[in-house]
Image (cartoon, rainbow, N blue to C red):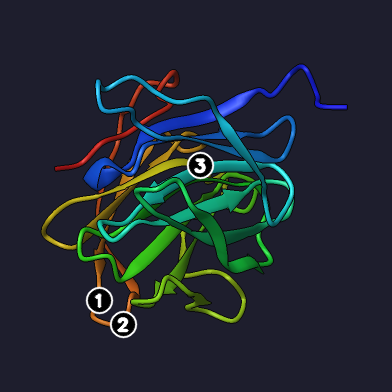
Amino acid sequence: MRNTRPSAAQVAIAPRGLGVVVTEKGTSLIDTFSFRHNGTLDSAVTHASSGSTPYGFDISQNGTLVVSEAVAGAASSYSLTARGAFSTISGSIGDDQKAPCWLVITKDGRFAYTANAGSSSISGYKLDHDGSLQLLDSNGVTASTGENGKPLDVAVDHNQHLYALDAGNHVIDGFAIGNAGALTPVSSTTGMPETMVGIAAF
């Protein structure tokens, strides 16, 4: 029987009219909604997540959905199409880190990064043209947010920089994204409020 408490983690509109995506952390389901011609949404179509507790996600311009799996300690990728088709590309690629919650894809669609709130780290994945994922570092640590670090969210700008909101140290860490996806620390903004929970970059 379907869990009556889906506990949605994230909702987003996919690019190019590919619909709306919702992750259900309470049921380990991913919902997709197609757009009708009048702009309203069709009924939800539910899909089983490759791993437990699908949480944060991002969608590339070509329709690749990359989802973090908070309990599984992994990320998966899926294909979305305008006709509502949904299929797994790479299922549950573990990063050996704890609580990968929010996830972001770079503007050029080449890399995806998870904020690992339970491991004081950020994990990077290479995102191929076909949507397949490959972990950048064998131990899952592409960057560290240091002792007491608790990265809750990540964002990227158009200049190939990644920013991590570290609620443990109350800072925003900035990293330059290398050609192969490596993260090099370049800045740290201190004095952030203890209540901060999200971040955005342009």
Q: Are marks 1 and 2 in contact (CB under 8 Å)?
A: yes
Question: Residue, x 57% and y 61% (percent of image)?
Answer: 76
Which residue is labeled 2 in the image?
Answer: 180
Kindly identify the residue that appears in the image at 29 percent across and 36 percent down: 190
Q: What's the distance in space between the residues labelled 3 and 1, CA to CA?
A: 23 Å
Residue 194 sits above or below residue 47 on the image: above
Instruction: Kindly identify the residue that appears in the image at 69 percent across and 24 percent down.
Output: 6
Q: CA distance from mark 2 to mark 3?
A: 23 Å
Asked if labels 1 and 3 touch by Cβ distance under 8 angstroms, the answer is: no
Q: Which three-letter amino acid code belongs to the residue tagged 3?
A: Gly
Q: Decide if residue 129 is on the left or right side of residue 159.
A: right
**What amino acid is found at the position of numbered circle 1 in the picture?**
Gly
Mark 1: give few (<14), some (14-19) or many (20+) Cα within 10 Å.
Answer: few
Secondary structure of the residue carrying tag 1 is loop
Relative to 43, residue 183 above or below: below
Q: Mark 1 or mark 3, which is nearer the start of the sequence? A: 3
Q: Which mark is residue 92?
A: none
Mark 2, secondary structure of its residue: loop
| Structural crowding at the residue carrying mark 3, measured as other residues with C-alpha within 10 Å and reported as few (<14), some (14–19) or many (≥20) | many
Instruction: Say which quarter of the image contains residue 93.
Output: bottom right
Which amino acid is tagged 2? Ala
Q: Which one is in front in this view, the residue at disc 2 or the one at disc 3?
A: 3
Circle on res. 56:
3
Residue found at the far front of this picture: 37
How many angstroms separate mark 1 from mark 2 (CA)?
5 Å
The residue to which callout 1 is attached is 178
> Residue 65's quadrant in the figure?
bottom left
